Image (cartoon, grey):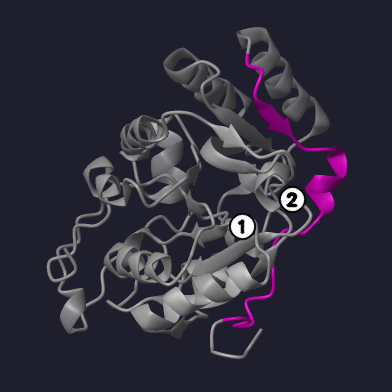
Amino acid sequence: MIEGCGLCPRECKVDRAHGERGYCGMPKEPYVARASLHLWEEPCISGTEGSGTVFFSGCTLRCVFCQNYRIAKGSVGKEISTLRLAEIFLELQKQKANNINLVTAGHFLPSVIKALHLAKEQGLILPVVYNTGGYEKAEVLKQLEGLVDIWLPDYKYRSQTLASRYSFAPDYPVRAAEALEEMVRQSEKEVFDRRGIMKKGVIVRHLMLPGCVSDSKDVLEYLFDTFGNRIWVSLMRQYTPLSSVKAYPELNRKVTEEEYQEVVDYARFLGMTKVYIQEGECASKSFIPDFDYQGVEKNSQ
């Protein structure tokens, strides 16, 4: 799949095994920008100890409003071996992480799968979180069955128009829906420990965008009609306009309190009971870590 890469819906078909690069901009071996304990995920993921988060470079979406644009564009990141990736997982376990959190790992999936097997053979027992923008191929995700415990995908849009304008992927709503159905299939039941930390389950994130209340409601309606209260939904209000959205004036502001509350109220109206909501101060808080290669190289923690 790397030699004629078809790991994501872009279907670039480039030979990444011999140096060619497709839409994600990445070669065959994993590029990682940071591997550390992360406290800014949902409470049941981070807890007080932190989530063992591995930030991979490159992205198959590269949304115009991306907060992690430095790694999405591949501006930062160091190439590591599959063996080193397995070591990172074990090092995070030694740091008392609640889980191993793979952030945007889909374009490195063959290496990630090998590294997970290697780490498990050497004593990795933590739950594995697959943290993704949602633009995945369901048939590729099948390769992760038995390896991933917690699925943490975005579901960004129901509108093909918005998906095309902001993520250059008009097929995003369909592809993300197919991927989510596969994730839910693999997650037969949710499990929490006595501290309230998730061990198995699905949490779908939806980042509200300014002026897109109607689409956010459509996202919630789709999720509830399809999955009911089998899954958790995280309604995020932390959108922050960056310089990259100057060409998109409608995005050049934050989500208002009224917009966010209207969507929260709609979730209640639908009957959704497993919803994370964010307080107002989250809209002014940065959730972006320093991509300083912490934990990437051995003895760099």
Whether residue 2 appears in magenta in the rendering, the answer is no
Q: Left or right: where does residue 189 sit relative to residue 217? A: left
Q: Amino acid at mark 1?
A: Lys
Quadrant where the C terminus is found in the figure: bottom right
Relative to 55, residue 177 above or below: above
| Mark 2 burial class by Cα count in 10 Å: few <14, some 14-19, many 20+ | some
Q: Position of residue 214 (x, y in %)?
A: 58, 22
Please tell me which residue lies in front, 49 or 173.
49
Which amino acid type is marked by label 2?
Gly
CA distance separating discs 1 and 2: 36 Å
- Quick check: 88 above or below 278? below
Q: Which residue is mark 2?
A: 47
Dot 2 lies on which element?
Answer: loop
Quarter of the rendering occupied by the N terminus: bottom left
Q: Nearer the viewer, residue 115 or 205?
A: 115
Q: Are marks 1 and 2 in contact (CB under 8 Å)?
A: no
On residue 246, which mark appears?
1
The mark lying in front, picked from 1 and 2, is 2
Q: Which residues are magenta?
A: 272-295
Seen at 53% across and 31% down, the residue is: 190
Residue 87 lies, in percent from the top left, at 47, 79
> Which residue is depicted at the point 41% across and 84% down?
80
SS assignment at label 1 = loop
Circle number at residue 131: none
- Judging depth in this view, the residue of 283 and 143 nearest the camera is 143
Where residue 35 appears, as percent x and y from the top left, is 58, 73
